[in-house]
Every structure is written in structure tokens, then in C-alpha cells.
Amino acid sequence: MTKPILAALMFFGLPAPSYSSEVSQNVPGFTKVLLMSDFHFDPEKPRGRTKDFGWPDRAAEDAKDSFKSQDSSYFLVRSALQAAQANCSNPAFIVCGGDFLGHNLPTNDLRGKTEAKLARLFADLFPGVKVVPTLGNNDTGGIDYSEPGTTFLGQFETAWCGEVPNASFNSKRSLSFTNLVQNNGSYLADLPGLSNVTAVVFNSTLVCNPPLWAQLSARTQDLNQILGPLLASAAKRGNVWIIFHIPPGWDYHNHNKMWRANERDTFVDMVATNADKITAMFAAHTHKNEFRVVYTNNVPVGFVSQIPGVAAGHHNNPSFQIATVECATGKIRDLQTYCLTNFSDLADTKANWGNFKANWVEEGSFSNTFPQAYNLGDGYYDEKSLNELLRELKPGDTNQNAELKNAFLRWCYTGHEEASNDEATHFSNYLNTLYVIKQGDE
């Protein structure tokens, strides 16, 4: 339905069409995709590394330790995967948005072994399901925000694409990397269940803002070289998803720009040029349920959906998402977020750790949380509906809808009770800087 017709219906008091995510998930032509990110898995938690690298079941102590830092224990990672499996047992494929590794892992083979352990956990709970992983800033063979290195890239490739040494999953992984090592962590991937869509997966750490990420090498990484050839190749085959870890724009948590300005401008050009091909883009990094709308001449031409983190530490509850996707186009019909609602209970030192049970629930879908924006966007989670949501939130307007604002903050923080006072206080600036990507936007 076109917007002029929709506007006419609203003018004459007629009901606007309603697009039901519950229906679209169960009719032919749509499939489900599981979205997870920012595990920050630290196998040392909480008692130190075991000699056999076996991660025994220490749910109580692991749960308590997971609450205290930005990294996840085996308990939290396994709990998240089990909850995802319970709510989406047979996804078409799984997108992992990067930062698999904890912040303080030593620079040795433990990093590769930790990556392999995560891959085996996925294989156990989702046998035969393709996982499409991207590298995060923590996914390196050395320190944070450094280049991954050929040794670690080989370990990464073996973990997700090689033979999985697990009795319940003896076949080859269904993902085939193309020139992963040569492209410094970037590659193309087919997406099962989507008939006309290719994923472009690239290592966005390489285009980060140097003052922010001083650990990167001095040599300049050019987005035209990193993303350009892969995007051109994928666009010739049909529609495109772009998957990466660090998005362009501002990180309001650290009050810094995340990409170099020239790379952001190049990205906007690429998205605008391929707007008819790119049906979805996914990033992560901030651990929150956020998004970015890409604009050219104030017209929305694309969007980046940010996958919330399994690890906490950024005023977020541990979370994952399930996308309902149109098989023929790769367009996102709707997006459901699930989170660990009783995670804050672990802060209570008097809690009975032995009886703690993780309570993962659906925090809400985009269509149900923001129905007006969803319907005005023609019933898809895309740049149109997200642009409408930003319009509804009225940045800079003192007459903002308080109920909508609170729903938006709860959506972003995945139900966490302690949304940052700074971000809530400077809400208008938060919207104008964080959720808008355009050329020359400083």
C-alpha cells in the first residue's frame, strides 16, 4: 500500500492496514533467522582454567560471576543458546555479530580453543544449521582492536567451517569461507532459505576511528578495498545482506565516532548506490537493541540493525533476536527480542545460587512495540519504518510522547531497569547523533 493511499485512509478516519508478525512467521514465503552477538566468552570464569578445557557445569558460581563483568561465563553462554533453541529450534541460519571472545584472554592458543568451543556449542544445539559469523574487535590473536592475524583467522575458519570434533555433529560445517584469510576476515556467504540473497561479511574493525582504536596498525584500511569488491560481486547475484560488527556513527556510551569520517561517507555512497539490492544490514558492538538509518539528501536509503549482546556490562540484559524474513527478497518482516529478565537478581549476594533459574522471555517485537511506525513503513522492519519511528519520537520537541519514549528506551536496553541517566536526559541529542548516518555528519 502506498503512503498517499495510507494517508488518505487516516485522513478520512478509516483504519490503517495492520501487518501481523505472528501470521507472517507461519505462512509460506517467510522463514526465521536467529541473531546473536557479543558473547565475550571467558573460559576462566569463575574458578580459573581447567586443565582439560572441559568447562564443568558450575551454574551457580558462573551465573554470579557473569553479572560482575562485561564477559560471559560458560553458564551464561550455554543458557542463552538453550533459550534460543527453545524459541527457534530450526532457524534457516544463524547470524553471529562478532566479539565471541572475552576481553582479557591471553594471547595464545586459548583464543582459538575458545572460538572452537563456541562453534561446538552451536553445533550441539543447532545441528546442521549454518552459522554466519563476523569478526569483532575482540576476535583477534592478540590485543583488543588489533588486526586478527593469519594464525587466528585460520583458527576462526577451522572452528566455524572445518571438521567439528563432536559426536553429535560429525559432518562438515555448512559454511564455506571464500578467501577469508586473504581478505583479513571478510567473505561472501550464501544464506539458506533465502532464494536470492548473498551475505557480504566484512571486518569493520579495520575502518575504525584511529584515535579511538590506537591498537590498529598504521597502514590505512580502505573501505573501497575491503567492502567494495565483495559488495559488487554479491549485487550481481541478486539481493544483499551486509553483516559486520562495529557500525558507523556515534557510540554514545563512549561519546566517540566509531568510524573514520571518510569511510563513513564511502559507506553512505555504497548503500545509496546499491539501495535496490541491499535488503538488510546487521551490526552489533554496543550490546543494545539499536539501529542506524542511512540518509542521502535527508531521504532514508538503508538501515543497520544492531544485534544486542549476550554479555552484559552496557546497561543491557543478555539478549538474542529472531527475525522473520521474506524468503524471496531477504526483507525483514519483523524482529523479536528475547532477554534474561531476572539477570539483575544475580546482584543480590544473598541469593540462593544453587536454585537460580534463568528466565528468558520475549521482551517484545518491533511490530507490537511500535505499531504506528511499523504500519506506516508498509509492514516491514526497514529504513522506512525506522525513519517513521524517529519522526514519532520527535527529537528536539518538548512535546515528546512520554509513553513512546519509555517504550523506546526499554527496547534499546532490552528491558534493563537502569537506562543511563545521561542518555535519558539527553534523549533528543541521543536520537540525532546515534541513529542517523549521513555524509559530513560530525
Image: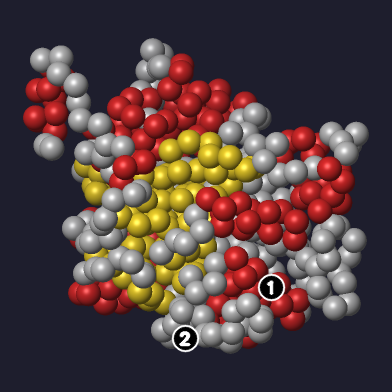
How far apart marks 1 and 2 lie (CA) works out to 24 Å
Q: Return the disc, 1 or 2, that comes first in the chain's sequence.
A: 1
Residue 166 x/y as whole percent: 66, 80
Quarter holding residue 107: bottom right
The residue located at (81%, 53%) in the rendering is 59
**Disc 2: which residue:** 182
Q: Is residue 297 visible?
A: yes
Give me the residue at 90% from left, 61% from top. Answer: 47
**Residue 313 on image: x %, y %:** 69, 45
How was this image coloured?
A: secondary structure
- Work out whether residue 214 or residue 342 is closer to the camera in this orientation and state it: 342
- In the rendered image, the quadrant that contains the N terminus is top left
Which mark identifies residue 117?
A: 1
User: Viewed as shown, does residue 106 lie left or right of 421?
Assistant: right
Task: Place residue 39 in its image quadrant.
Answer: bottom right
The disc at residue 211 is none
Dot 2 alpha-carbon crowd within 10 angstroms: few under 14, some 14 to 19, many 20 or more: few
* Above or below, 373 relative to 15: below
The amino acid on which the numbered mark 2 sits, given as a three-letter code, is Gln
Report the mark closest to the observer, 1 or 2: 1
Q: Quadrant of residue 244?
A: bottom left
Identify residue type, mark 1: Lys
Residue visible at 31% across and 77% down in the picture: 229
Residue 315 in the image: state x and y as whole percent. 64, 38
Q: Is residue 319 left or right of residue 233?
A: right
Secondary structure at numbered mark 2: loop
Considering depth in this image, is 116 or 243 the residue closer to the camera? 116
As displayed, is residue 42 above or below residue 429? below
